[in-house]
Image (spheres, rainbow, N blue to C red):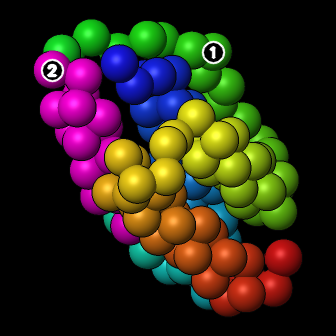
């Protein structure tokens, strides 16, 4: 059975990016860039959750500590996101979980792209 605590941690990351998007100055590129990251994360985290639950044959999700940081700066949110993804990767088995690893790699790529676009 796959560990599902990472689903809620990835969900918290997505929520934090949305909060940052809403708080970003809409006259700058930050608002639009964070909005695009949110859209990508929403889609990727949904796929990650559905695949994990499909592999488990269960809809049960372990709720972990969800930390929302509505006043955190972009750099912190993105760096915490990279940590969340790295921790999730450590729980997966190569070969058996390539589908999940690919999603996590896509999330990492989107975060790093956003860091470049925001210059953080």
Kindly tell me whether residue 75 is visible in this rendering.
yes
**Which residue is denoted by mark 2 in the rendering?**
57
Q: Main secondary structure of the magenta part?
A: helix
Pointer 2 with pointer 1, Cβ within 8 A: no
* Relative side of 115 to 54, left or right: right
Disc ID at residue 51: none
* 64 magenta-colored: no
In the rendered image, the quadrant that contains the C terminus is bottom right
Q: Which residues are magenta?
A: 40-57
Q: In the rendered image, which residue does mark 1 sit on?
A: 65
Q: Picture coordinates of residue 48 (x, y %)?
A: 33, 46
Residue 28 picture quarter: bottom right
Q: Position of residue 49 (x, y in %)?
A: 31, 37
SS at mark 2?
A: loop
Marks 2 and 1, the one that precedes in the sequence = 2
Question: Which residue: 22% across, 32% down?
Answer: 55
Q: Quadrant of residue 2?
A: top left
Give the residue drawn at x 59%, y 47%. Answer: 89
Q: Nearer the viewer, residue 46 or 2?
A: 2
Residue at the spot 67% in from the left edge and 25% down from the top edge: 67
Residue 26 image offset from top left, x and y in percent? 57, 75
- Mark 1 lies on a secondary structure that is loop
Q: How many marks?
A: 2
Query: Where the N terminus falls, by quadrant?
Result: top left
In the displayed structure image, the side of residue 58 where residue 75 appears, left or right: right
Residue 23, percent from left and from top? 63, 56
> Is residue 14 positioned above or below 29 on the image?
above
Q: Nearer the viewer, residue 94 or 101?
A: 94
């Amino acid at each position: 059975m796959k560990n599902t605590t990472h689903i809620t941690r990835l969900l918290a990351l997505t929520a934090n990016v949305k909060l940052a998007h809403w708080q970003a100055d809409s006259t700058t590129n930050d608002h639009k860039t964070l909005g695009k990251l949110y859209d990508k994360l929403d889609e990727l985290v949904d796929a990650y959750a559905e695949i994990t639950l499909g592999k488990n044959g269960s809809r049960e999700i372990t709720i972990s500590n969800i930390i929302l940081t509505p006043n955190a700066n972009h750099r912190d949110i993105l760096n915490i996101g990279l940590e969340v993804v790295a921790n999730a990767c450590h729980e997966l088995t190569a070969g058996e979980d390539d589908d999940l690893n690919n999603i996590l790699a896509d999330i990492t790529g989107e975060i790093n792209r956003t860091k470049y676009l925001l210059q953080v």
